[in-house]
Every structure is written in structure tokens, then in C-alpha cells.
Amino acid sequence: MSVTKEDVRKVARLSRIAVEDGRLETLAGELNGILGWIDQLNEVDVEGVEPMTSVVETVMPMRADVVTDGDKVDEILANAPKRDDGFFVVPKAVE
Amino acid sequence: MTDLTKLTLAGALDGLEKKEFSSRELTQGFVDAIAAANPVINAYVVETPEKALDMADASDARRANGEAGKLDGAPLGIKDLYCTKGVRTTACSNILDEFTPTYESTVTQNLWDQGAVMLGKLNMDEFAMGSSNETSRFGEVANPWRRAGGDNAKLTPGGSSGGSAAAVAADLCLGATASDTGGSIRQPAAFTGTVGIKPTYGRASRYGMVAFASSLDQAGPIAKTVEDSAILLETMCSHDPKDTTSLPVETPDWRADVTKPIKGMRIGIPKEYRMDGMPDAIEGLWQQGIDWLKDQGAEIVDVSLPHTKYALPAYYIVAPAEASSNLARYDGMRYGARVAGDNLNATYEESRAAGFGAEVQRRLMIGTYVLSSGYYDAYYLRAQKVRTRILQDFRDVFEKVDALLTPATPCAAFAYGENADDPLAMYLNDIFTVTANLAGLPAIAVPAGLDGQGLPLGLQVIGKALDEAACFRVGGALERAAGFVAKPEKWW
């Protein structure tokens, strides 16, 4: 599998990172280098092996379904790039 | 008065207890040292001298009342990856702008609850992605160590916890918090002649730590001695309901393990860690470590971990994949930097292009690629299966041995720029450390000697899951045998 300029453009869009056309070629080269090196994993026999989901065997804990936190509008908005009257202000999302 | 900043954490706590000096005097010593050194070393990205002195005064008052905690009055540095209430926390990324948390991470809260004093926030690779500290938005950290013979090349302290390691090595704190996703505690410790330990995954809460790769990230300290690292780790670890992967287990008294004899312990030497082209100094140090442990009555056992060579490539699927998911939260809407675009998508894309550095962008794109439709099975799922194989290797050898001894890094600290053009060469820094992250195991790096250029080198001890005690025991034995007391000559 070789990553093309078009693949980089697509991945950049999926990653929500603006990439100028001039950088696509370089990035494709870098990604191919890394992915080519990663390809050695194909040598490993993983037939019948379960994918690892947790390093220590443990049961996911459950908590009571109750409200434990709240009334923190000012704290939640404290780092907002734009805010107004208790709300985040964001660019128009619906035309 | 003697220079209090030269004390170990254990020594300083002892002096405070005996009222030989106050926390204020001790803290003032570090505040002055940081003010003088930081313009050159660049270990701290936020200095909090007023907060530190206030905390020191409060500590002195507690001690006078007989209410001192385990770390009372001890000045520490905090990696910029831990959320600290009211103190800017950015993981050294532009995308977090001037983010100032309104809450405290569990690990740092545990330290403050025991009376520790905060000196400031420590430099690191952006989002902990790097092995040299050069991806930080705040610039490079200078390793306090320099090559012998008048070569004044600026060396990296390693990464990602480069600021933590440099601050400890230069006596700019008694100890520091750090974090380890693929070797980010142990590699900088080895590069700076300090001690670093990553505990078993789940020992320390990840609540309030800026996430990189959630199944690998783990908190731990960098300290001057093995004993100091045990004191810090005991306080940092706890069961925390706010982190679902936090283990409901008791934290043992690790400090007592540091001095326990190792006679009769079985120490495995994994043959796959003997790499082609490994420098003689590393090879020699490893053999020296084997001899030291043998001399103290340990039984040395040759073992095999056949999937070792696949750990690093598996890591470079798992870590970027998890990072691409974790870092999706940085969209410039609720916090952090926003760069306005023509529409909503353009605003996301411009904000993230401006906010993330080149290495972070590269890893996010790799992560997105390996998770994208049609590639998930070939990359991510296969990597997670390889991870199971790696864990099984460890389980098999831990039937026969109590701990493993390996080098901590494949080389000594390198000069800035030496690996920067080649991402793959940089990734190889983690070749001996990354296996413990993939398998979730505890591992400690202990300084054990100097190379031909006078730079420190470290050995690594990997233990069974939840057996940090073995790491501290063997680490303590190596420390005593090595008698490593070398410090960088002060040039800053």
C-alpha cells in the first residue's frame, strides 16, 4: 500500500487539519516511510489471537446513575475563545 | 548555609522534620535557582514563585502544629501535562493557547494533599509526542550534561518529559512529575543521570492529565534517587473513581523495598534487547549490571521475548490511532486557540493547522489513516493482536524470572538536530522502553555509569504487573553497586 497525494488530502480532511497543496508531496513521503516500516507487522502470525483491549484484567466499574456535579457555568466557560451571556459563541453551523 | 537545592527529597524531608531549615528557606532556594538557571535551561514554562512561597509558609505552619504530611514542604516541579487549577496548562501546544484549568488532576492533588509545594510547570514535547523536547511550543530544554572535552553542543535531555528530567538533574526541584506513553519518563531519566519509574498501567489516575494515548499513558516521577522515586510514586498512585481504568488496589510501602536484598531473585536477560550496532558503552554497561546483580546473590537467567522487534511498529499504530481520537477535542470551540475560517469546517481545519506542530500533525494523520475505513483491520486490529503476543511473551518469561534487566536507551543524550530530519530514527529512542507500555508493566530507569564522552547511561528493570516492588528492589541494588554520584558540571 502506498500513500498518494490524494490519500494525504483525504486524511488531512478527515483529521480536520488544513494542509497546503505544497506540503502534500512531503507528507506523503513521510507517511509512506513510517507505514512501510510498520508493514513488518505482517510477519507476525496472529491467527486465532485476540486483540488486546486491556493490559490488566479487570471489570469495568459501574457507578450509580445519579447527578454528582453541576452548576459550573462560569468554570465551564472560563477558557472559551468567545462567550456571551452564559453560552459558547461558535461560527454559524447551518446555512 | 549549605545549598539546600542539592539535597535529595529524602534528605530534605529529614531536614524539615528535624527543623534544620524551614520549607520557606528550602523553597526560596529553589525559586532563586530557577530564576538564575531557567533562561538557559528552559525547564520551566510557567514559574509560580509566589504560589510556592505561600504553600511553603502553609507547610511550615502545619509542621509547627504537628500536622505534616508525607511530602510536607517539599518543592516539586509539575510536567505541563497535568491540569493545575488556576495555573496555565498547555501540554506545550499552541492549540491550548492560555488554557487555565478550573480543576486539579488527581495525581497533583495527591501531592498537595501530602503537603508538597509547586514550583511551576515543566517543559515537554508537544502533547508528549517526541523524544527530544524539541516539539515544545516553548522551545528546547538544555540538558545540564555536556560532552567532556570542551564540546559545548547543546544536548537534549530526552523527551517527552525533558523539562522534568533537566529540572531534577540541575537541582531546580527536589523531584518532578512526568508521564510515560512509550518511554517518556525513562528515556529522559537515562539521558540526565536521574531515576524515572513508570508504574503498572492503572496504578495512577489519568484524571486531569492531558491525554495522548489512553491505553498507554501512565503517570510517574523523575527523581534524584531510587528512594526518592519510591516516595513520590507512593503518593502519586491511588484508586480514583474518576478514571475507569484506575485499579482498585492498595498502594504498597515501596520505600521499604529499595533497601531489601536481592539475594535469590531471578533476573531475566532478554536476548532480543541485544541489538545490532548497539554502542559498546551500552553493551558494557548492561554486562556490568548483570555482574552487579550476580555479585549480590541474584540468579541470572537468559530469556527470550520473541516479539520484541514488533513492539515499536505496533506502538506507532496504537499510539497515533488513540491520539487522533483524543485530540479530536481540540476544535477551537470551547477552549484553546480559534482561527476563523470561511465556514465551520474551515475554522476547525485552520485552528488545528495553526495550533498543532508538525510532529503532532504527522501522528494525527497516521492515526486517522490507520483507523480509516478499509484499513482498520489491516493496521489497528493487527497491532492490537501483536500487542497480545507481546504481553504473552512477558507472561511466559515471568513464569521463570522475577524481573528483567535491559539497557534503558540505545544511546546517550544526542545533540539537537541530530535526529530531527528523520522521524524513524527519533522513534528508535523508545526501542527498549515501549514494550513495558504495550504490556502495561512497571519499569524503572536507574543511572548506572558514564559513556566515553562523560554522559550518563541508564539501566532498566521491568517487573511483573503490580510488582513495582521488584523494580525498586533491583533498582536499589543497581544504584548501590553503581555508586552513581556524578553530577553535571555547572555551566548555566
Image (cartoon, coloured by chain):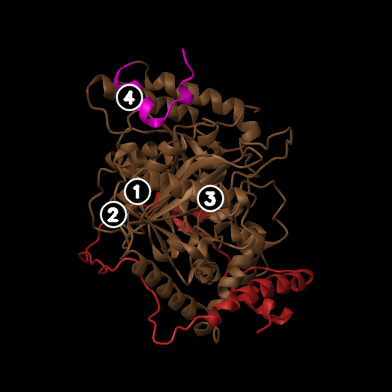
Chain colours: A red, B brown
Per the image, the residue denoted by label 1 is B106
Element type at marker 1?
helix
Could you tell me which secondary element the residue under label 2 belongs to? loop
Query: Same chain, marks 4 and 1?
Result: yes
The earlier-in-sequence mark between 4 and 1 is 4
Where is residue A91? Give x, y as percent. 58, 65
Local crowd at mark 2 within 10 Å, few (<14), some, or many (≥20)?
A: some
Q: Which amino acid lies under the numbered mark 3 shown in the image of this protein?
A: Gln
Which quadrant is the C terminus of chain A positioned in? bottom right
On the image, numbered disc 3 is attached to which residue?
A: B187
**Residue B179 seen in this snapshot:** yes
| Residue at mark 3 shares a chain with residue at mark 4 | yes
**Distance from Cα at disc 3 to Cα at disc 4:** 29 Å
Q: Which mark is residue B240?
A: 2
Q: Which residue is at 40% across, 74% downward?
A: B388
Q: How many angstroms separate mark 2 from mark 3 (CA)?
A: 27 Å
**Mark 4 highlights which residue?**
B14
Relative image position of residue B229 (x, y in whole percent): 39, 41
Looking at the rendered structure, whether the residues under marks 1 and 2 are on a common chain is answered as yes
Q: Earlier in the sequence, mark 2 or mark 3?
A: 3
**Image coords of residue B66 (percent x, y):** 22, 23
* Chain of the residue where label 1 is placed in the rendered structure: B
Q: From the image, which quarter does the N terminus of chain A lie in?
A: bottom right
